[in-house]
Image (cartoon, rainbow, N blue to C red):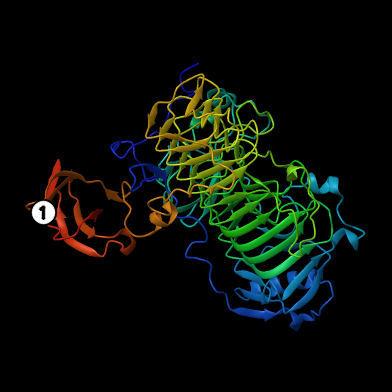
Amino acid sequence: MTAPPFVSEYQLTPEDVELLTPADVVGPDGLVYPNWRKVGVQGGIPDVPVALHLDDLGAVQLMDISGLIEEACEIVGASGGGAVLIGPGTYYLDELVTISQSNVVIRGSGRESTRLIFRYSLVNQNAMTSWAITNTWPEPAAFMFLGDPLEEVDRYLAEDGKRGDTQLKLIDVGDLQPGDKFLLRAPVTARWQSIVYDQSYGAWGTKTAHYEITAVDAVNDILTLSQPLRIEYPVIDGSYLRRLFPIERSGLESMTIEHTDKLPLHTVCSQWAWNCWVKDLRVLNSGRSGVHWSSAKWCEVRDSEFDSTWNHGGGMAYGGFTQTTDCLMENCLWINYRHAPVVQFGAQGNVFRNSTFEGSDAQWHAGWSTENLYENCTILPARTVFADSTPRDILPAYGTYRFGMYSTPSHDTSHGPNGPRNVVYNCDVNSIRDGVYARGASENWLFLHNRFNVYGNGAGGFYAESGFFNTIIRNNVFILEDETKPMVFLRTADCVGIELVDNTVYGGSGTIVDGVIDVAINEGNQAMPALVSGEAYPARPLPNPSSIYDWQRIPGPPAKPDSLYFAIESASSSSREIVLYWQGEPEQTYTLQYSENLTDGFVNVIASDIQATPPTNVYVHKPGTATRWFYRLVSE
């Protein structure tokens, strides 16, 4: 079919003022992005002072300190929090460590100084078997951040929760209070699966997210949330929420952890964790995944290195987020994992940036993962030698699918489709199979300012099928070795609304787009000859701004309704007057701010206490000699 699989909700432009919501941010390039302003540990990762030295509890080198770590966490947690410091040296972990106290940090003396050897089944007769580990939830780990179980009370929505809403109306708010946290879920139903063609079994098409309550209207059973919804939660599907009680503001820092035990155990995992972090960690030969944030919100992993895993089969060797909301990975190195970066099971609003992944593929792996950002990430071939040049044990592609980037489709019964508006921004991707293998049904993904070096026979630049529609592919560079392959191939006729703008392909067949359907927009694209042997690769595109994530977080980018939009009525170079107009709302007052450079923020106030004059306000500004001008209107 040549129609999209379902009605689009995310194909938005800055002119769609009535459709834009607090979940949207209009970028400086005229594209509408998801809102990533509240991602990662809120307020940043703190420098937590040391409250207890583990050697004060009897820790010495070459002993099992797993029990002492748990004891120290209980002591420090009971006294209000702080850091537990592990001194320099090598220590053993012979048991799984559970961290259930908030405001507690386990800190080594540095990656080069503190080394923990995870031995578990090698010395523990009561160790879990491999079968038991893979059939246990939450998935076991050397270090587990564990909150309390969910409240077993389902509170059902009385009205649909719509994309961009910051309030929910329930049938009964009960005893919910401001500050409470909850898991919001739209159950997977036959109705919903039929809309997105989801043929997966079980609850793979997960639609869940974590939210915090800022206000409760008990009379009208309305909750106000700290963030807008990213997707819809329909009443017809039985959408509901459950209060949760997470571990909060705890972390693991500054050490090396090495698995000599080959059981499929994560190094770090979570269940119901908020604002927790891993920082300055090195993991060698994890049993499963180095850090795997699961059922978490506002958590981070940064400034860390993860080198190899013992196991690379299904469900193993992932570097990313499962069923998480607004988590952040930054400045990390992953070596010879299976899928990394990866999101799955309804992961929403997560960000991976400034990180390198050797020997893995980037994945949107299952369950309606939505509005995640991959920014300035590098995907490289597997590392074949150690630092001393001795060869590594190279597994066949380490279990990766060998594409640069891959999204699971609706007809994949083991995974199911992914959600809308995932974004790939200024990444450098190297692969032996297609640079992007995009499979729907899903809509309005953004691939912007990336370089794809595809060096395998039979591999093209961008492959789309199964209702992957309304996607924007702009200002990318594709380098193709196979002279028969196009830059973009659309395999199925439901891949409608694709926009190709200002892309360049080197090599391949010289064809911009091929397949059973044409693209909606084909502008400014060019095909260049194949690179000759020894010729330097073309440079990565230079995006403006260099980071859409940073741009959103500096003061200034407008988003409705916190700020309103301007239209420029006239701009005269002789008079240097700019006439601004906006829709005036009754009984509102406004402050008009001005900047010549967004990186400096909106530090200049042009006027305040501007009274609304419905239906339209008009203001004339003379910006002087500046060559560019940025305005923000704040509703007071």
Q: Nearer the viewer, residue 333 or 33?
A: 333
Q: Furthest residue to the right?
A: 125
**In the picture, residue 313 is in which quadrant?**
top right
Task: Identify the residue at horizontal 42%, vertical 41% (top origin).
Answer: 475
Residue 274 position within the rendered picture, expressed as x and y whole percent measured from the top left? 57, 58
Seen from the viewer's position, the closer of residues 164 and 409 is 409
Which quadrant holds the C terminus? bottom left
Q: Which element type, helix, strand or loop, lies under badge 1?
A: loop
Q: Position of residue 281 (x, y in %)?
A: 66, 66
**Residue projecting furthest to the left:** 575
User: Compared to 524, does 623 lie above or below?
Assistant: below
Above or below, comparing residue 171 to residue 515 in the picture: below
* Residue, disc 1: 576
Residue 205 percent location from the top left of the image: 60, 34
Residue 233 horizontal side relative to residue 430, left or right: left
- The answer to which image quadrant residue 277 occupies is bottom right
> Is residue 245 visible in this depiction of the protein?
no
* Residue 458 place in picture, x, y as percent: 64, 30
Position of 458 relative to 330 (above/below):
above
- Residue 202 appears in the figure: yes
Q: Residue at x 57, y 24 (%)?
A: 197
